[in-house]
């Protein structure tokens, strides 16, 4: 991860090289993560047979993935908790040394998190891709009684909006979450003001939301194939637990300074904590700098916070003729397009039209407050195993990802989406600027 400078697409290239070397189809990986299959190498049985010992070793490693990740979480809690206590004395006497140690710890946490995410993704990609091929993935995910931590987060947010739980109950469970939560520069729900909460929740209704009923016919299948789905749950649990640690790191800096630390680069903050520079002399970040402290700060990704859309799979020249995306959860929905560029508190206001279908470039768990306001979700970038896809599938929300880029959807368009086939039809375009 360090050598690839944090760029997931460079890591993907290395992974595809391995797939070719092992005789496996490259499409197996690309479909799961939402990337372009620029190799387009199919299954090569003889090569696979020659690599049989490798597969057995990989299978053994993946069978221990869940336990390995759980052990890592327990270890990292204790390790960073002890070091945080040790830093309390440093903050009193040597703020520069304390910040330097804080920075090293947070960098290590981020790199180890990405490593363990990749371990779980590798372990679950094969079984879940097979379930998808058999047409069982969406049905079984919806039928399982136990849901992932990310889906619990969405359900808790829905209950809060409908006054089924109070705010403190929500904060006790998910106060460490928030928009773009993997960026430590972003606020958590713990920090929201009353005005923020009013903007987040909108007008609260005193009624239970109507939730889709589960089909009992799928229950036995869900129990039989639950181990494969639990790997996906482990990854969402890992994200939730790590976001608690992210909050600990953020709160530690907030307790030490009123300075909006996320507006400055680490080297400037180090000089500030050492007393070499006052707040009013700190260099201001460039106007085009990444917002907050995201992965580019710690993994040397100097290409911006998000890859440009035109570099991703679904807008490549090879896919301009493709007319459908990938269905995540089945269901036909007609509604008005709510086109959102990024998940922020300020843009969390759907149009005064119903029903509404959310359309975004890419999604992550930070979009949970948006999911609770719509009848369907469409994204241009994503995969079967992305965090958002897991949430939408388990929550019975019709969804499509990897919609081809040449299918342009704008605010106010009346469309029909089919979460089973991945088809999107524009029934009528917006007629006025008012819409």
Image: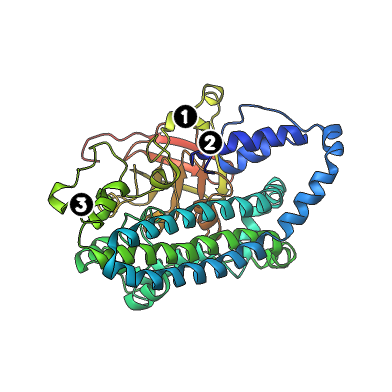
- Residue 356 vertical placement versus 80 (above, below): above
Q: Which residue is mark 3?
A: 276
Give the image location of residue 16, x and y in percent: 65, 34
C-alpha span from label 3 to label 1? 42 Å
Asked if the residue at tag 2 contacts the one at tag 1, i.e. Cβ–Cβ closer than 8 Å, the answer is yes
Q: Tag 2's secondary structure?
A: helix
Label of residue 311 in the image: 1
Q: Which residue is mark 2?
A: 9
In this rendering, the label closer to the viewer, 3 or 1: 3
Q: Nearer the viewer, residue 204 or 117?
A: 117
C-alpha span from label 1 to label 2? 10 Å
Q: Earlier in the sequence, mark 1 or mark 2?
A: 2
* Mark 3 neighbour density, 10 Å: few (under 14) some (14–19) many (20 or more): few
In this rendering, the label closer to the viewer, 3 or 2: 3
Label of residue 248 in the image: none
Q: Is residue 203 visible?
A: no
Residue lying at 35% horizontally and 38% vertically, measured from the top left: 413
Q: Quadrant of residue 370?
A: bottom left
Give the image location of residue 33, x and y in percent: 57, 42
């Amino acid at each position: 991860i360090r050598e690839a400078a944090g760029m997931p697409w460079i890591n993907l290239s290395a992974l595809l090289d391995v797939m070719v070397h092992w005789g496996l189809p490259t499409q197996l990986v690309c479909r799961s993560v939402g990337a372009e299959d620029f190799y387009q190498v199919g299954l090569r049985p003889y090569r696979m047979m020659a690599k049989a010992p490798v597969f057995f070793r990989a299978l053994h490693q993946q069978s221990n993935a869940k336990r390995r990740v759980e052990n890592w979480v327990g270890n990292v809690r204790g390790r960073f908790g002890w070091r945080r206590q040790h830093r309390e004395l440093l903050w009193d006497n040597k703020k520069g040394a304390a910040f330097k140690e804080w920075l090293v710890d947070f960098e290590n946490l981020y790199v180890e998190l990405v490593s363990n995410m990749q371990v779980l993704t590798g372990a679950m990609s094969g079984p879940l891709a097979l379930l998808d091929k058999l047409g069982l993935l969406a049905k079984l995910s919806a039928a399982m009684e136990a849901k992932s931590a990310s889906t619990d987060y969405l359900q808790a947010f829905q209950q809060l909006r409908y006054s089924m739980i109070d705010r403190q109950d929500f904060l006790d469970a998910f106060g460490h979450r928030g928009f773009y939560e993997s960026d430590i520069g972003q606020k958590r729900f713990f920090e929201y003001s009353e005005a923020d909460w009013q903007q987040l929740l909108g007008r609260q209704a005193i009624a239970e939301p109507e939730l889709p009923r589960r089909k009992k016919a799928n229950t036995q299948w869900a129990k039989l194939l639950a181990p494969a789905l639990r790997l996906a749950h482990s990854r969402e649990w890992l994200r939730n637990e790590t976001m608690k640690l992210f909050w600990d790191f953020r709160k530690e800096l907030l307790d030490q300074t009123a300075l909006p630390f996320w507006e400055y680069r680490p080297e400037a903050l180090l000089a500030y904590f050492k007393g070499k520079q006052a707040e009013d002399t700190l260099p201001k970040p460039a106007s085009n700098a990444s917002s907050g402290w995201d992965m580019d700060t710690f993994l040397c990704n100097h290409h911006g916070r998000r890859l440009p859309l035109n570099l991703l799979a679904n807008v490549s020249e090879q896919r301009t003729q493709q007319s459908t995306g990938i269905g995540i959860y089945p269901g036909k929905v007609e509604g008005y397009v709510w086109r959102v560029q990024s998940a922020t508190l300020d843009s969390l206001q759907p149009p005064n039209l119903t029903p509404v279908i959310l359309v975004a470039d890419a999604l992550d768990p930070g979009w949970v407050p948006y999911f609770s306001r719509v009848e369907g979700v469409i994204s241009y970038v994503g995969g079967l195993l992305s965090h958002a896809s897991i949430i939408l599938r388990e929550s019975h929300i019709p969804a499509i990802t990897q919609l081809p880029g040449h299918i342009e959807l704008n605010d106010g368009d009346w469309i029909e989406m089919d979460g089973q086939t991945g088809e999107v039809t524009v029934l009528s375009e917006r007629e006025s600027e008012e819409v």
